[in-house]
């Protein structure tokens, strides 16, 4: 038994945690693109992204400005996801309307 986990084991553990996090929010049926974007949102909001890691090294928890930066990055990612989903819904609605008009 090794002291350290392999890269594959770490990735499997990360995926399992992410899957549980998604299930807790009823988001388990996301497309691959949406999954990747939600993962980025979670990473930014938790401050574990690249900038978050730098903040933890370079600053203490008292540094509100850097914590706010992580939150704003997460919110920005959420906004992109919402825009993408709204666009998809609008296109689906247009297609439904066209089908209904063609049927009549």
Image (cartoon, helix red, strand yellow):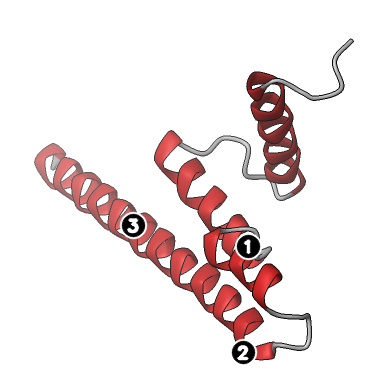
Which callout, 1 or 3, points to the residue nearer the camera?
1
The secondary element bearing badge 2 is classed as: helix
Query: Where residue 23 sits in the image (x, y, percent)?
Result: 72, 40
State whether residue 22 is above or below residue 75.
above
Residue located beneath label 2 in the image: 65
Which residue is rendered at x = 70% and y = 28% of the image?
10
Q: Residues within 10 Å of mark 2 (few under 14, many from 20)?
A: few
Pick whichever, 58 or 101, lies toward us: 58
Residue located beneath label 3 in the image: 84
Pick whichever, 37 or 87, lies toward us: 37
The secondary element bearing badge 3 is classed as: helix
* Left or right: 15, with 33 as reference point: right
First reached walking from the N terminus: tag 1 or tag 3: 1
Which residue is rendered at x = 58% and y = 63% of the image?
44
- Marks 3/2: CA distance? 29 Å
State whether residue 51 is above or below residue 35.
below
Residue located beneath label 1 in the image: 53
Q: State the quadrant of the N terminus.
A: top right
- Marks 1/2: CA distance? 14 Å
Which callout, 3 or 2, points to the residue nearer the camera?
2
């Amino acid at each position: 038994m090794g002291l350290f986990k392999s890269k594959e084991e770490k990735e499997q553990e990360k995926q399992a945690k992410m899957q549980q996090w998604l299930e807790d929010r009823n988001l388990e049926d996301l497309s691959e693109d949406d999954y990747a974007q939600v993962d980025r949102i979670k990473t930014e909001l938790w401050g574990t992204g690249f900038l978050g890691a730098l903040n933890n090294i370079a600053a203490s928890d008292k540094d509100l400005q850097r914590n706010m930066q992580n939150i704003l990055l997460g919110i920005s990612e959420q906004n992109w996801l919402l825009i993408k989903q709204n666009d998809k819904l609008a296109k689906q609605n247009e297609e439904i309307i066209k089908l209904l008009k063609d049927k009549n």
